[in-house]
Amino acid sequence: MVETISTSREAILLEEQYGAHNYHPLPVVLTKGEGVFLWDVEGKRYYDFLSAYSAVNQGHCHPRIINALIQQAKELTLTSRAFYNDKLGIAEKYVCETFGYQKALFMNSGAEANETAIKLARKWGYTKKGIPDNQAVIVCVSQNFHGRTTTIISASSDAIARSGFGPFMPGFKIVAYDNVDVLKEALANPDVCALWIEPIQGEAGVYVPQAGYLKAAEELCLKHNVLLMMDEIQTGIARTGSMLASDHENVHPDILILGKAISGGVLPISVVLANDEIMLVIKPGEHGSTFGGNPLAAVVCMEALKVVKDEALADNAEKLGSVFRRRMEELMKKTNLILQVRGKGLLNAIVINDSPQSETAWNICIDLMNHGMLAKPTHGNIIRLAPPLVINEEQIHECCDIIEQCVLNFRK
């Protein structure tokens, strides 16, 4: 029998006592999810406006994805890559054809996928571009978020992510985001093997670049024989109103990095996609993961992507994202508490008119929670708002009503 918890207080105290303190959760203890909703252990229902950082785009516990998981779990879950299995090749073919690449490399977490992309880019730089050994440079951008491994934070400009974790790995050059001029200079360096960017910076607070930035980046990479590495872990899988955020500018990165919703939030699955010239620079024994490409993940990944297509979730995100931003812009006219609204599709944020050091955004999220809606601040004064893409228009308006009520009645 699995031990159960009957009260929120009990669960919170257990985590505080026995768990690492590397997160600061809202004081809500969740026990059930279905579609756009979550329930706490006391039975209260909430709208989920975080979607596990866009991992559950298809909604919580989507029956098709869960059924695929159950059926495969009864047959075979893990072989490691020491042997072939009968599901991985099918999944590799499916994701390659879905996104337009020749090769796929399955891993588990988003951080692992980004680490994989780093290794691919460097190895390609040495073996294909002719960069001298140990001199390869990856250009990245300020405010990025690609994970928290020691290699990845070496490319971060976030003091919280970096403080106390040095020494850092060399080989990264950080330039300003959404600035084509700095890219022109940085990518001209012959030792640069890759440009590593998010098409929209989700964790930073939903920063959407100017139209044309991604296309210009792609053209500069082509000009200077530099790989374009696109981290679409949060922005991909229909979140921004197209299957990939880079699709909005018809950009096709050399290395595509996916995770989170590629499993519908059911399993840790990530994948890196590239063509043969890039992917095949890595040889047997040079990279891998015990769980990467397991048959359970392969089946779940395919079903999760099929749900996105069959239910037209990208179209729904495009339509309802416009509805949501229009409502938030109308709310801005009624209060000076909201400084800015920004986003694309159903990846949105409201910037609270207070300092990042204030408790205002946190307290608003507590009030939203009390009114049946879950969201979380990022970088102090920004509230990211990203519901599962199965939400409907009536529910979007109901949630906008909750936000409006909490913001207009908020008292510091």
Image: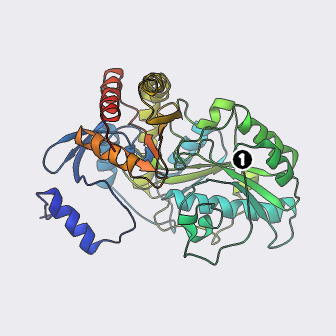
Q: Is residue 223 left or right of residue 73?
A: right
Residue type at numbered disc 1: Asp
Residue at x 75% of width, y 43% of height: 179
Depth check: 229 or 324 in front? 324
Question: Which is nearer the eye, 163 or 50?
Answer: 163
Residue 161 falls in image quadrant: bottom right
Residue 139, image x and y in percent? 74, 57
Q: Secondary structure at mark 1?
A: loop
Residue 354 in picture, x, y percent from top left = 47, 45
> Percent from the top left, x then y, of residue 46?
25, 39
Residue topped by disc 1: 254
Left/right placement of residue 372 relative to residue 264 reads: left
The percent coordinates of residue 237 (x first, y second) are: 51, 39
Q: How is the image coloured?
A: rainbow
- Taking the view exactly as shown, the residue that stands out farthest to the front is 412
Q: Quadrant of the C terminus?
A: top left
